[in-house]
Image (tube, grey):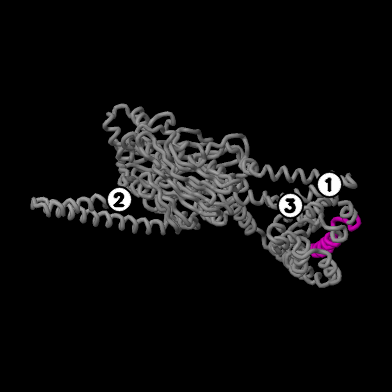
Amino acid sequence: MILSCQNICKSFGEKIILKDASFHIEDREKAALIGNNGAGKTTLLRIIMHELSPDSGNVVLAKDKNIGYLAQYQDIHGHHTIYEELISTKQHIIDMENRLRSLEQEMKTTTGDALDSLMNTYTRLSHQFELENGYAYKSEIMGVLKGLGFTEEDFERQIETLSGGQKTRVALGKLLLASPDILLLDEPTNHLDMESISWLETYLLNYPGAVFIVSHDRYFLDKVVTKVVEIEAGNMRMYSGNYSAYALKKAQLRDAQYKAYLNQQRDIKHQEAVIAKLKSFNREKSIKRAESREKMLDKVQRIDKPQEIQNQMRISLEPRFVSGNDVLTVESLSKSFPGQTLFSDISFEIKRGERVALIGNNGTGKTTMLKIINGLIDADSGRFTLGSKVQIGYYDQEHHVLHMEKTIFEEISDAYPTLTETEIRNMLAAFLFTGDDVFKLISALSGGERGRVSLAKLMLSEANFLILDEPTNHLDIASKEILEEALNSYTGTVFYVSHDRYFINQTATRILDLTNQAIVNYIGDYDYYLEKKEELTEKYAPAAAQAVTEAKQASDNKLSWQQQKEEQARQRKRENELKKVEARIFRTSPPSASFMTQLARATKKNSPASRFVRIVEKVVRKMPTHCARISSRSSGRRASFSIGFSTAIVGTSLYKNQFRLDDLLGTVADAVHSAHPFQLVGSFQDFGYTLGFLHLPDGQRKLIFGLLVQLGKIAAQLTGQEQLIIPDGMLLLQIHLM
């Protein structure tokens, strides 16, 4: 057991949030915390993190274990880039790496006992560095960033330029890289697209620690969790299995409990009727029998009636007056941030009565466009025009329209001073805020509760043009369905951003896809968008690389007949050269059998060196096909090849993935280098550090690097270069000095 909550109680005013809540999480277990919005899920997580104190009860964390917490809202500041923010989680590994390099320099000038001491320290630190995944920490960071939907161009973006959703993804990435013993995730999928959600599912399934998740995404929970912890009316209950198993068991348990309650009530009423009948006889014998039955009835343990949870909010969206037919006209709109162009020359129109969904990958500028239309930020160029009598109602995903220092009641009464207290309370009751709930501070509300307050203000605005930024975030399933119904019956105009595919399919009459800095229009729902996406994107918003390719193809089509003939002749010449290169391998001698045997004997079984040796023969056999391509590509220029340089580049990948043959072949085939030879000497040394070859005795070390030299010569010949870029003597001298 890694985490245990024992008899946790928590109240806010007269409202009981948690009542004797107890549960536990086992090591490596994946569990979900579910409940209606406001049930106390986030409160429980904050109690576990010691951000809130329980009224009673204890939170017990196993010895020497640590917790990582992803809150619903992240406020990341600073002038760091995305990559700098994530690599900060690996600072201890970077420090170890720097210390190793420092020790290596010291060992070059140290002798005797001092050298032995340094080597012992180096060995221990190297082992720790390996255990901490030090050889692959940069690859790990890259994998997490790309998995969460960031491109390599995004890595250098400043944190301060990111949207709220992007900041949450950065915080999630930092948390995953920190790899705590237990992860507490509060709505981790809210700001992820479907591809990123799928990646996160796989990541969490393979996560070596425990995971405790709050989420309303049923499919996500079905995929990841094996236990469900439910909070209902302050009570807590655990269920084994995923969400679907929980839902089935929950329904069965509730039915059984309700039937048991009805049966007991029927028996009680029957006994009470018999007792009343016996007493009516007014005889001593009958009275004694009645008293006996009363005593038996008093001893019966009464079954509580299953509590009906009020979880249905009521939304009625009606505009105060009708707008003109032209609601929004956007003309040649452009917006960029330093180092990033979001969109350029965007134009579209929205007519009265339409429900238009704006979709696109995270970071493409959807929220930015909504903010421009709401006048919160300025566009770089272009303009937008609102139609006649258009009144905007804005729903902000970060709820900046709410005042954190106010109570719920004050938030509504200050915005709409003409409403009476009774009218405000009745309206808030429709959004599940009753009793003392209305006096909660906005800052103390959960994400779902803040969303309901924002929806309440939106309803009261009586606007005829609703602009919604991720309106389903933090809403439970029942609330999403109610919002869908309200929007479908709304007589005004709706323009919204959402990643919820089901919600889009239920509500949108038109879809605008913001992709490749352009807008593609789809007149239909999400199913229609999926059907036409590839065709229309290629036609109206081709990628930059694709556009260049198309332009090149168009240019090639304009070649004269004579130019075409010359190009065909050059192509035939290249094909003939390829055939010669393939034949040359048979004249190139691979490492001799005796050399390989000697090398195999000199290395320990299953060591990095021995695993490298075992794939060399495979590399040599498969090299002609790969290197032939290099020869043709490098024709007409002086090309040199360095096996040391190439293997140094992928050394980390080879080491952590058991010397993947494809990685080595691809690098051997592609690493054509023309730099000064002396710049590559260090590459051999880096390669030795990466794979641990420098720990071998001198003889074994020379054999390993001798093999690299032979392999490099073969590759150099296949690429059309007869001499290895680094002369043998220089290389062997460097090996001796290592």
Which label lies toward us, 1 or 3?
1
**SS category of the residue bearing label 1:** helix
Is residue 21 covered in magenta? Answer: no
Left or right, 137 with respect to 60, comes to: right
Q: Is residue 495 visible?
A: no
Label 1: how many Cα within 10 Å (few below 14, some 14–19, many 20+): few
Q: Secondary structure at mark 3?
A: helix
**Magenta residue check for 722:** yes
Horizontal relation, residue 240 to residue 699: left or right: left
- Residue lying farthest front? 284
* Image x and y of residue 687, in percent: 78, 54
Q: Secondary structure at mark 2?
A: loop
Q: Residues within 10 Å of mark 3 (few under 14, many from 20)?
A: few
Give the x, y percent position of residue 379. 51, 35
Query: Which is nearer the eye, 77 or 718?
Result: 77
Judged left or right of residue 13, residue 679 is right
* Residue linked to disc 3: 127
Q: Residue 306, which numbered label?
A: 2
Residue bearing the label numbered 1: 117
* Labels 3 and 2 touching (C-beta < 8 A): no
Residue 142: x and y in percent read: 63, 50
- Which residue type carries mark 3? His
| Residue under the image location 72 percent in, 56 percent down | 650
Tell me which numbered mark, 1 or 3, is placed earlier along the sequence. 1
The residue segment tinted magenta is 703-731
Whichever of labels 1 and 2 marks the residue nearer the N terminus, that label is 1
